Image (spheres, coloured by chain):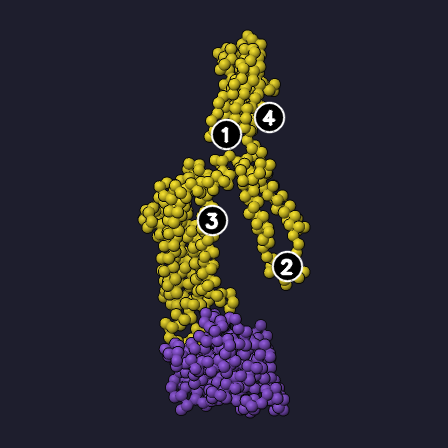
Amino acid sequence: MIVFLIYVAIFIASFFVVKFVARKTVTDFTSLKTVTFGDESAVTPNRIASILSVLTIFLLWAAFTGSSLVPRFLHAPGPFIGDATFTYTAEADGVAPDDATVTVRVFEVGTDVADPEVPPGEGWAKNDVDTVGAWRSGLVRVDRNDAYGRDAGHRVVAVNGQPIEPGGEVMTEFGRVGMSPKGTLNFEPAKGWQMEPIWLPPPEAVVARLGEIASDGYRDSTLWEHLGYSLFRVVVGFFFGALVGIPLGYAMGLSNWFRGWFDPIVEFMRPVPPLALIPLVIIWAGIGELGKIILLFLAALWIMAIAARAGVSGVAISKVHAAYSLGASKWQIMRHVIVPNSLPEIFTGARVAMGVCWGTVVAAELVAAEKGAGMMIMVASKFQLTDIVIMGIILIGIIGFGIDILMRFAEKALVPWKGRI
Amino acid sequence: MNGLSIENLSMRFDLPNGGSVQALKDVSLQLAEGELMSVLGPSGCGKTTLLNIVAGFLAPTSGDIMLNGHAVTGPDAERGMVFQQGALFEWMSVRDNVSFGPRMAGRREGDWAETVDHLLDVVGLRDFKEKAVYELSGGMQQRVALARCLANDPDVILMDEPLGALDALTREKMQGLVLKLWKETGKTIILITHSVEEALLLGERLLVMAPRPGRIHREYRLPFADLGVNADLREVKKHPEFGQKREEILGMIWDMEEEIMGRTEENA
């Protein structure tokens, strides 16, 4: 919640700051329009906003994970580290209540720690020491070193002077002191607002993990093998899907019989999410490469068939008529009119199919695989290696984005007339 | 026998709702080689259907079409077609569009290159031959379509409102070009148009068709096309007979349109 509020505050503040700081230097036609609200063509992405948006996400990520990448004053309050103290008041049968101090050394998990040294103090209740990791909690058996133990009716009645009873709690400046139903004290040091690395590691930890896995690998395969296997499956599955789907779509666009025969199949399979096929494919083809490729083939097949069919339907009949009256044969019309005319639709379909395939392969690897980006993050999540999970998600996103960019470049180069007819 | 001969052509087809449409009824006409005939008529009079049947895209329910002594049964390179718009191949350059017919016939480049370059000269697109067609203006695109049709050297050219999508000024220029090409090449041309002026200017013969069923209403022989070959088209329009014919035909079409409107209102 607090993160969201900060995000909104940055959004609004940067809007006004940029608005007042940035001079309007562009004097193109759009800048002269007075009606921009409601004119979609006058709305272009503000690149400053895009940069700030990305920076804000990383800033929030770094601030709430105590990253060393941002200066200390930007950090959200971290967990308490150091020696925490609180006093307790204990009663025992036949003696007056006595006070003693508990000193708990809160350490960063993963570092060496020694018990703090304190004098035992006066009275029958002796001072206690303990250690507990940041973000963790620990039971403090204060009665162990006291002169009267539990068998003598030892019980804690107050912490820092505030009464406490089993099941209750007292907040101290160092954290929460609770009491278990059996009367044992439980110290939970203040957690601050930062995320614990096992939930969200700081950016530099993710980068470090990227370097480590890129050089050493994870689960017997290097990072590049994992990503390469995923990409390989997508490319092969998509290739075969297009190889079968495009001719199928053409046939459906050109022949009544093909259209009638395959319409029920295609129309039924199209709305079936490829993910729903994973169990069946695993039953039939196992979790190896073959199963993955069959799954991706099926994911791409229907999309490509429908795109090719739409491409054929999209041919202006006057073009076909013109070609016929110029003396072209059916085969020539196919090659010189129908195929080129359907390329824009096929590219649109290919972009969609590649996106779906990439999503499907990751999902299929999450379910079962020996190698692959999805398998990597799935296994890492089982060991709570959040840094690997986040690294994997970012890499999967970058690759998916990269595939789309490549397809767009190919489209621009091969179908320059798209949208200009 | 040379030329185009259409005899007792009728076209009738069923509608999905059980009714049927008589698109053409007993249309007969003879077109000698080298004649230019324009076809006018209110919408729904079957003029585009007639053109599609002559082109071979549609089969008539009865009647015969003969071209140079043989029957027309399907599309063929002997009958070229120029469409209103959108019939160019965007994935080809201007030159590839114009040379499409010869290339599909399997002729070598040495064979057709000269003709194609000459035609590009005639339509004024020499400097644009390597351009993509989507980079050209509408008027230029129609000139490409004309050149493409001529490059195939058809016996008959069928034009389906070829200038309908152009602005008024470009249209005037293109009308001159069509006349010039007609005289130079001596092709037989059927030209469908919605503009009475265009039909008068370009048509050596003018056919006015009437709707429901589509049939020939009246035919004219006009001198304006011959005049226009040598004179400014705007001068031709000042000809006293031109204005008189225009009013006559406009009135005729108005009457037909009103009759259709009246009928629809009765039905409603």
Label 4, secondary structure: give it. Answer: loop
- Circles 2 and 1 on the same subunit: yes
Residue type highlighted by circle 1: Glu
Q: Residues within 10 Å of mark 3 (few under 14, many from 20)?
A: some
Give x and y (percent) for residue A47: 58, 53
The numbered dot on residue A26 is 2
Residue occupying image coordinates x 49% and y 38%: A201
Figure colour of chain A: yellow
According to the picture, the residue beneath numbered tag 3 turns out to be A397
The numbered dot on residue A108 is 1
Q: Is residue B132 above or below residue B206?
A: above
According to the picture, the residue beneath numbered tag 4 turns out to be A173
Q: CA distance from mark 2 to mark 1?
A: 53 Å
Residue occupying image coordinates x 47% and y 49%: A397
- Circles 3 and 2 on the same subunit: yes
The mark total stands at 4
In the image, A94 versus A253, the foreground residue is: A94
Label 2, secondary structure: give it. Answer: loop
Chain letter tied to purple? B
Instruction: Select label 1 or label 4 by which is in front.
Output: 1
Label 1, secondary structure: give it. Answer: loop
* Sooner in the amino-acid sequence: mark 3 or mark 2: 2
In the image, B86 versus B17, the foreground residue is: B86
In the image, A109 versus B140, the foreground residue is: A109
